[in-house]
Structures are given as C-alpha cells and as structure tokens.
Image (cartoon, grey):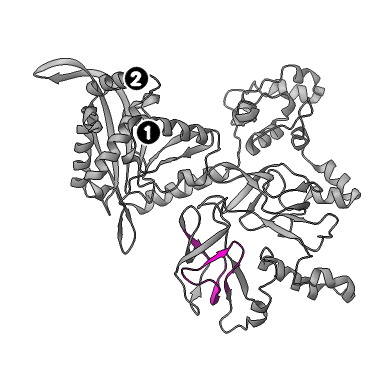
C-alpha cells in the first residue's frame, strides 16, 4: 500500500524546509535507510532517509522549492500502484500521518458496525480543528525521544508557544513548545516512555472533541487519557502505576519535582521516596548521582519490617558473591556508541604525538589573566593555536566522502565536554576569527549549557576539527577517536614538570604532550606532522597568535 512521506521537522525551530537535492527519482527502488533527499532547515542541510521500502511513485516538492513541515514530500509504494486517490486527498490536514490512514482502513475491514457508528474511525480527515502533534526530531541524529516531563495534562488549555513537555534526545533534554492553540485532548507517550520520531505524541483541539478513533502505535494506550475518559480504567492504571511516578507529581510543599528519567527509574528500583531527595541539577532537578548518594536515615525506620530487614542485609554482601545491575542505555549513550563505532571501524586512523615546552605559555597566560575581567585557560590557548594552524594546513580541515574530499573554507572547532551521561561536543563557529578572551568566554558558556543539558543541537553541529583535553584529570598522554565527519582530533594531556635540556644544561621544565589522530584517507602522515610542527610554534610562542 502506498504511503505518503511528509516534510519532516529536522530541528526544534523548523517550520518549513527546502529540498536541496533529490538523491532518488520517480521510479527508483527505495530501501529502508536509503537517503531520499538533502533538506535544508533553518539550521543546516541534512540528509533525510527513508523509513519504508518500495518504489518512489511521486515527488511533491521539487529541488529548490520550500514547503511547510508535514507537507506532502513524496509517495512510496508498489511499482505501478495507482496513487491518484491518495493524492486527491492530500489537502487533508498535514499532521495526519499515513499510519493513521492505514489504521483507519484496517478498522473499516475489521469492524462490522453500522455505517453511522463506524464513520468517525473510517473518516480520512481529522475532526475540525484537531491537530496531531508528533514526536519531533530535535537533533540531526535523533531517531527516537523520551518524554522526561509533561508540563501540561489532558484537559489543560494550550496556547501557541506554551511548553508542552521536556523531551530527552540523544544529546540533551529540551523543552518542546506547542505550535497550536486549543485543549490537550490526548497524550500518546507517557513520562519516561520512548517513542520513534514522528509517532503520535499528543492531540490538541477544541475542548470536548471525541478523539477516541485517533490512535498512535498499538500498545501505547495513555493512562492520562484513560483517567479523563474512563473512571474504571483510571482506577486500574492508578493501581498499576509505579510508586516512583506518584512521588514525582509534587514535592512536600505542593510544587512540581524535576527528575531525570534515569534517576526516576533508579529511585523506583531502590524504593527511594523522591520527596526526600535533594536535587543537585539545574532548578533542583534530581539526577542519577543524587539517588546513588542518597542515605535513607529516617526513611529506613519508617519502612516495613520485611523491607527494613532487606535494607540491613543488602550492604553486607558476603565475600565472593557476584552482584550485577542493569541500567537501560539512554538516547545519548546509544548515539555515542553508534557514532564512535562507525568512526573507529570505517576510518583508517593513525596517531602522532609531540611534546611541547610550556614555559612561555605559562608566562603569557599569567600576563593575559592579569588584565581585569579576563580569564584564559591553557585549553583556550590550544584551541586558538589549532584554529591558526588549520589556516596553514587546509588538508587537515577536510571531510571524506566516497567520491570527493570536502575542503572546509571555514574553521569551526568542537570542544569535547564530559557530562553525566556521556560526552557532548559544543562547537566554536569560525574559531579562527575569535580572540583568546572570546574563545574562553564561549567555551565556558557552551560547556555550562552542555553539563546542564540545555545546549541546543545547532550549538553542537558543524565542527571541522575537534579538541579533547583530559589534562585536568592528570592524564599525560592519550589518543581519541575521530569525531566524524572531521578528519582529525587533537588529544591534550596534562602539563608536568620534568628535567629537560636547555642551552646544553639540564633544568626543570614544564612540558605537555599532545596527540593528533588523523583519518589517513584525507590526511597523510607528513601532513599531520607538519600541522603539529606549526601548532608547536604557536603554543610555545603565544605572542605569535596575537599578530
């Protein structure tokens, strides 16, 4: 059966998209995962892949044309299939997905109800004023999202611009705002649950509208809707709901608790009352470490005798006893694993290490930081030196593709930042045009956003080179996996004191090792070595970076 493919929302602020290039033409065979087109959003040009297999029967938006999100982009189906009837109905509300139409037709066949009774379910159009809100793609690599918190409940009035929910992507937890006004009639994905991009998230429309015939994927019957529509089902679901879910509704003062999905899951498994936990995250958000560091104290005394006995025995594990715990991988950790595996197993990489004399850098940094309201770190010096070295060695500022090598004329440096659940790489756009103090301020700002999961996807896109620094942890030397599609990444170690030879004399010197890992497809060994020599000159003589 033919399926309509709509213009996807590829960023949290995208309202329309432009088809930059079609990689398939009408009549071509399409496999699941094939790249259909390159779509230009308000933030970047992204590849859009097919989620269905078949033949490309129709293209609704030509190259260079712009259309709103959810407009008909293409139709995929069986070769020779008649899609005229499908296209005639394309003026129906764009938010109505093809999955919804397939379910509607299935209901027509399976249900033998009177025509008047079956009409709402069989209708090819949504009730007047009703909008289906789908799980948005909030980052370029996001394939599914987890609802961390609903800020509206079924029956609430929603205005355009109101925050509906906080959604955890593979990179950050982001606020998702409503683009429509009305009443929240249905919730399709409950707090803590994950769902694929474009699946039914919620339904908004006029108050009192019957949306019972509009469903998402099977098995996602929302408890919130049942509570509003069917008291009997509500009692059943309240009895089955995890205690941890009840605890996060409000704190002891009647306010709303902010809890990360992972922290909530761990609290549920350990039987921790979230009202008694003090959150260390932004706005008092309870995170994983708060649950792990929580000591029950009075809560242990109030527990049931049987539970108390278990709590007393658990810490005293006999020697030799094997104990394990399974923690579900969140979206960020799964994406990190996938991207690093792709890089490690596709790029023929090699590494070059060089030792730098840091005496002049230490002295120069002291002079710079003596200026009021100025704070520059050694990492900032390294980022600036990399940006200037990339100007002289454009081969390192490239990207590999099967048919071509892309030479980036701009220089944007990603700075790896460790966060609670993994690693994020904020990007300093046009870093070669920034001063040392501007680099310092930008890195501090982006790192803070990354650690608080408030960084926007656009702030982590477009890097042409990456710097990873573990010197603050005392690591003297290490190698990093290339952050593709970059061709190289620099690993920065700690500054240490050791005997060195200067002017024929053994003296105590300050040295630092850096390791450049390169993709051999684009950067040859000699090119990588020349880049490091230029980097060495800049870092050992910081005054040359101010020219």
Residue shown at the point (26%, 22%) measured from the top left: 364
Q: Is residue 64 magenta?
A: yes
For the record, the magenta segment spans: 46-75
Residue found at the far front of this picture: 372
Residue shown at the point (58%, 74%) measured from the top left: 75
Residue shown at the point (77%, 45%) measured from the top left: 153
The answer for how far apart the CA atoms under marks 2 and 1 are is: 16 Å
Tell me where residue 70 appears, x and y as whole percent: 62, 63
Tell me where residue 353 appears, x and y as whole percent: 25, 36
Q: Is residue 462 visible?
A: yes
Pick the quarter of the image with the N terminus: bottom right
Direction from residue 131 to residue 523 in the image, left or right:
left
Secondary structure of the residue carrying numbered label 1: helix
Of 457 and 265, nearer the camera is 457
Direction from residue 385 to residue 132 in the image, left or right:
right
- The numbered disc on residue 371 is 2
Q: Badge 2: how crowded within 10 Å, few (<14), some, or many (20+)?
A: few
Q: Nearer the viewer, mark 2 or mark 1?
A: 2
* Residue 296 quadrant: top right
In this figure, which residue is indicated by the disc labeled 1? 439
Eyeballing the image, is 167 above or below 253? below
Direction from residue 73 to residue 411 in the image, left or right:
left
Of 53 and 324, nearer the camera is 53
Q: Is residue 321 magenta?
A: no
Q: Badge 1: how crowded within 10 Å, few (<14), some, or many (20+)?
A: many
Of 539 and 368, nearer the camera is 368
Eyeballing the image, is 82 above or below 482? below
Q: Are marks 2 and 1 in contact (CB under 8 Å)?
A: no
* Residue 283 quadrant: top right
Could you tell which of marks 2 and 1 lies nearer the N-terminus? 2
Tell me where residue 252 appears, x and y as whole percent: 78, 25
Tell me where residue 77 appears, x and y as whole percent: 59, 76
């Amino acid at each position: 059966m033919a399926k309509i493919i709509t213009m996807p929302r590829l960023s949290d602020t995208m309202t329309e998209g432009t088809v930059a290039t079609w990689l398939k033409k009408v009549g071509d065979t399409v496999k699941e995962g094939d790249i259909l087109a390159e779509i230009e959003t308000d933030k970047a040009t992204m590849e859009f892949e097919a989620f269905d297999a078949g033949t490309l029967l129709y293209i609704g938006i030509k190259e260079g044309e712009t259309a709103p999100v959810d407009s008909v982009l293409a139709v995929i189906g069986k070769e020779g299939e008649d899609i005229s009837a499908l296209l005639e109905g394309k003026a129906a509300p764009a938010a109505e997905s093809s999955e919804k139409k397939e379910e509607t037709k299935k209901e027509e066949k399976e249900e033998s109800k009177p025509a008047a009774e079956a009409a709402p379910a069989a209708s090819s159009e949504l009730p007047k004023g009703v909008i289906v809100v789908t799980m948005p793609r909030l980052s370029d690599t996001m394939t599914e999202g987890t609802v961390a918190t609903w800020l509206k409940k079924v029956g609430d009035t929603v205005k355009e611009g109101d925050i509906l929910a906080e959604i955890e992507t593979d990179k950050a937890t982001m606020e998702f705002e409503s683009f429509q006004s009305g009443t929240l009639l249905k919730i399709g994905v409950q707090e803590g649950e994950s769902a694929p991009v474009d699946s039914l998230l919620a339904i908004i429309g006029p108050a009192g509208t019957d949306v019972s015939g509009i469903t998402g994927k099977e098995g996602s019957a929302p408890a919130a809707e049942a509570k509003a529509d069917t008291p009997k089902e509500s009692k059943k679901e309240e009895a089955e709901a995890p205690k941890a879910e009840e605890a996060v509704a409000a704190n002891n003062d009647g306010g709303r608790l902010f809890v990360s999905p992972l922290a909530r899951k761990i609290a549920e498994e350990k039987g921790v009352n979230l009202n008694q936990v003090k959150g260390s995250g932004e706005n008092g958000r309870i995170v994983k470490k708060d649950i792990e560091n929580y000591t029950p104290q009075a809560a242990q005394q109030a527990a049931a005798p049987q539970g108390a006995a278990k709590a007393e025995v658990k810490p005293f594990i006999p020697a030799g006893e094997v104990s394990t715990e399974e923690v579900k991988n969140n979206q960020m950790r799964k994406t990190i694993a996938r991207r690093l595996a792709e890089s490690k197993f596709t790029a023929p990489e090699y590494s070059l290490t060089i030792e730098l004399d840091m005496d002049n850098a230490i002295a120069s940094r002291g002079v710079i930081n003596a200026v009021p309201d100025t704070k520059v770190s050694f990492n900032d010096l390294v980022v600036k030196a990399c940006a200037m070295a990339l100007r002289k060695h454009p081969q390192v500022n490239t990207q590999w593709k099967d048919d071509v090598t892309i030479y980036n004329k701009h220089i944007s440096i990603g700075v790896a930042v460790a966060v609670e659940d993994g690693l994020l790489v904020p990007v300093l756009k046009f870093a070669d045009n920034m001063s040392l103090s501007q680099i310092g301020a930008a890195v501090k700002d982006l790192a803070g956003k990354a650690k608080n999961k408030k960084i926007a996807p656009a702030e982590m896109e477009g890097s042409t080179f990456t710097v990873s620094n573990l010197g603050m942890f005392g690591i003297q030397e290490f190698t990093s996996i290339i952050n593709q599609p970059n061709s190289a990444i620099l690993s920065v170690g700690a500054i240490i004191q050791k005997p060195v030879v200067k002017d024929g004399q053994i003296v105590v010197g300050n040295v630092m090792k850096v390791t450049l890992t390169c993709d051999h497809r684009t950067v040859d060994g000699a090119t990588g070595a020349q880049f490091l020599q230029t980097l060495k000159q800049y870092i050992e003589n910081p005054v040359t970076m101010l020219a």
